[in-house]
Every structure is written in structure tokens, then in C-alpha cells.
Amino acid sequence: MKTLLIDADGLVITRPKYFSKVYSETHGIPLKILTEFFENEFRICQTGKADLKEQLKPYLPKWKWKKSVEDFLEYWFTTDVILNQKMLDIIDLLRKKGYKCYLASDQEKYRAAYISNHLKEHFDGLFFSCDLGYKKSEQEFFEEIIRRIQTKPEDIEFWDDEIENTQVAVNLGIKTKLYIDPETFEKSFSS
């Protein structure tokens, strides 16, 4: 049996633009003001070491957001989490054929919960950096997943749309594939 680890953003969640770019364009805020948060505090939230709501509070006035933190998160997630139904259909079919499919993604806890509510029925399990305490760029991220699913690294195939995210997995003996589009993904299982 084959075990698949599949990243969220860019694969099962479409990502034409990062949320920071969308917000910058729609609210007239220079991107540099937004990226300060996303390159610093947000990364800490992704490993569960800080709470996103608390970290956002000092930034929202700078971003000209006049509503609550909760309203901001709702706006963010409903704007940013657009499901790739074609990929989900393929994953559902692979599971029917006996593949074990797991989501493996760098997420902070609120976005992870939002994503879980929309994707849990399509996967055998969901692994998020905020729960594991490590990001995909860290060996421990994959080691913990391997431990939890009790599968040998060589029996796992990890799919991501960013090549730099796959190097740590390769070093552990996990097969990796670079995601291009749903059609290419599907063809790789038809041979």
C-alpha cells in the first residue's frame, strides 16, 4: 500500500496569490507593511509557539483594519482558502483504490482548524506544523508523521509545489514529487 503526504496550499487549496498580496491590493496597504508580520510573528504561530490572534492585534491598526481580530481571520480564511475540487476528487479516488492520503502542511492553529473543517473527509489524517511543533523545513516534522502513521519512509510519497520543501523529506528516505497541476498528479498514478 502506498502512503501519500500532500501539502495544502497550492495543491488542495488554490493559491493564485498570497493573502498578503491580495490584502495589499484590495486595502491599499504597502506589501512591505504586511510582510513584516508574515515573515516574523506568523512563522512562530506556525509552530504553535505563539497565538495568531494575540500576534495580530498590534498589526491590524497599521493595516487599517477597523473590525475585530475574529472578523479579520474570517475575512482572511474565506478569501484565502479556495478548495481545488479537481485535486480532492483525485484524492478521493486514490483512497478508494487503497492509498492512504494525509495532509501535511505548515499552518497556524486557527487556519488549520478552518482547513480541517473543509478537508477532513478527504484525508486519512491531517498533520499541521502548529500541532507537530515543527515546520516542513525541519526533519522532526516528517519524523513525527512517520511515527504517528507507523509507515517506513521509503513507503511514503510527499507532494509539494515548492521544491525547497521537499529536501528534508528526501534526506529521510521519503520519495518526493513536485506538484505542477491536477492532471500531472493524476497521471502519476495511472501507470
Image (cartoon, rainbow, N blue to C red):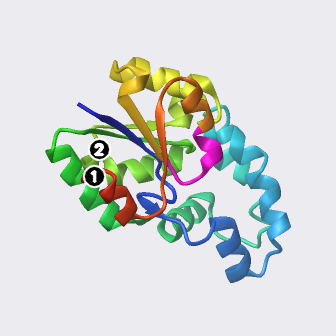
Q: Which residue is mark 2?
A: 123
| Structural crowding at the residue carrying mark 1, measured as other residues with C-alpha within 10 Å and reported as few (<14), some (14–19) or many (≥20) | many
Judge by depth and name the residue closer to the eye, 181 or 26.
Answer: 181
Q: Residue at position x 47%, y 29% from top?
A: 174
- Is residue 165 covered in magenta? yes
Q: Which residues are magenta?
A: 160-166
Q: Is residue 169 left or right of residue 60?
A: left
For badge 2, the amino acid type reads Phe
Determine the secondary structure under disc 1.
helix
Residues at discs 1 and 2 in contact (Cβ within 8 Å): yes
Name the quadrant containing residue 29.
Answer: bottom right
Left/right placement of residue 12 relative to residue 43 reads: left
- Percent position (x, y) of residue 155? 35, 27
Kindly identify the amino acid type of the residue bearing the numbered disc 1: Ile
Look at mark 1 in the image and give the residue it sits on. 91
Mark 1 vs mark 2: which is more N-terminal?
1
The vertical placement of 150 against 189, above or below, is above
Question: As rendered, which of 165 and 58 lies closer to the eye?
Answer: 165
Question: Which of the image's four quarters has the N terminus?
Answer: top left
Instruction: Identify whether 168 is placed above or below 114.
Output: above
Callout 2: SS: loop
Asked whether 57 falls inside the magenta stretch, the response is: no
Q: In this rendering, which labeled residue sits more in front, label 1 or label 2?
A: 1
Q: Is residue 39 left or right of residue 50?
A: right
Above or below 28: residue 8: above
Give the residue displayed 74% in from the left and 63% down from the top. Answer: 60
